[in-house]
Amino acid sequence: MDRLRRQAQGKQNLDQKRIAQLKHCGGITALFLFFLFLLNPVKAQESNLAILNGGVQKSEDAPFVSSEYRFMPGDYIHFTFHVAGFTVQSDKEKEVRKIALSYLITVEDLKGVPLAPSDTGSIETELSSEDKSWTPKRRSSFLLPSFVASGEFQVRVVVKDLLAKTEVSKSFPFHIGGVVVAPTTSVTIQNLQFFRREEDRESLEVPAYAPGDTVNARFNFTGFQLGSENTYHLSYGILVRRPDGKPYLQQPNAAELQAGSYYPAQYLPGAANITTSANSSKGQYTVIITVHDLIGKTNHEFKTAFSLE
């Protein structure tokens, strides 16, 4: 009996030892698999969701603009796109097929700053058996800022498939023409031009007028500081000196510019309209424009000239 008892006890100890070894090996295996997962994570299934047939247009449903086309500040920009590769949820009992998408369209500069409020929407509808090749189409339009400098911009679209929990994004470039702004760290005056008439678009190569004419000058303020909500506050004065250096016209407070905008204004337009008399002396007149940046607490003086002949 003692011998049988000793044999049974030995067998029990051996079984417990084997179980402990198996548990130890299992722990090592689990730890190995965990580190293997960290090194080689399982890739998520690639989505077929896609943005197709998208482009920028001058008007709704017009052809897409070419890369040479230039929108102007204050223009409307139109955009169209299709969505494909979305998940269709089927209910065989009800014979219903559904899709659920959302989208976000943003017109922005190359730094990602929006030019206008984004357009958001959803596409949730039921499909019939005849809709196998159907792709939803969406349109959108945006008003470009009035005081945006020429450059490259983009329309960025993000589409989410709410059923598959996937998303896709795509950008569509476009260009804005108009005012070219040179970088500057403080308020300054750029692009000053003289015109024969106030409504003219073509500037004068030589700013020469006859006594009695009105001298029309247009220019841009740049480099000013912005306050909260993209507010700006400028004032400027105009001083015109005769050929002999004496004052001809003095307007220390010619105009004040104060407002705000959704997109940070990159320039502000200014103008000077100088009415001469028939008996004004002939010769060269000096124009001095002084601008005050009331937010940035800086000033700038700009000199130019015209002649009466």
Image (cartoon, rainbow, N blue to C red):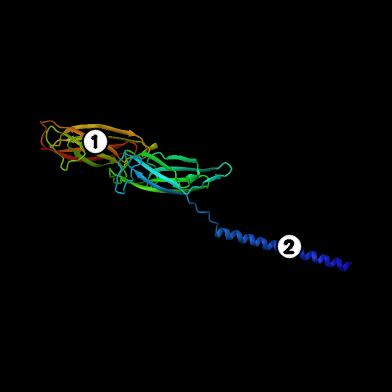
The amino acid at mark 2 is Ile
The x, y position of residue 205, in whole percent, is: 16, 43
Which residue is disc 2 drawn over?
19
Does the CB distance between marks 1 and 2 fall below 8 Å? no
In three-dimensional space, the C-alpha distance between marks 1 and 2, rounded to whole angstroms, equals 93 Å
Q: Residue at x 27, y 40 (%)?
A: 220
Element type where label 2 sits in the image: helix
Residue 83 is situated, as x and y percent measured from the top left of the image, at: 44, 46
Within 10 Å of disc 2 (Cα), the crowding (few <14, some 14-19, many 20+) is: few
Q: Nearer the viewer, residue 241 or 129?
A: 129
Residue 113 appearing in the image? no
For this view, does 277 lie left or right of residue 51? left
Is 207 left, or right, of 17 in this rendering?
left
Judging depth in this view, the residue of 117 and 205 nearest the camera is: 117
Compared with 4, 243 (above or below) is above
Furthest toward the right, the residue is 1
| Three-letter code for the amino acid on which mark 1 is drawn | Ala
Residue for badge 1: 271
Residue at the image position 45 percent from the left and 49 percent from the top: 50
Q: Quadrant of the C terminus?
A: top left
Up the image or down, 29 lies above or below 165; here it is below
**Residue 104 lies in quadrant:** top left
Residue 187: percent from left, percent from top: 30, 41
Q: Is residue 29 visible?
A: yes
Q: In the picture shown, does residue 166 fall above or below 217? A: below
Helix, strand or loop at mark 1: strand
Q: Furthest residue to the front?
A: 130
- Mark 2 or mark 1, which is nearer the start of the sequence? 2
Task: Look at the image and tell me in which quarter the N terminus lies.
Answer: bottom right
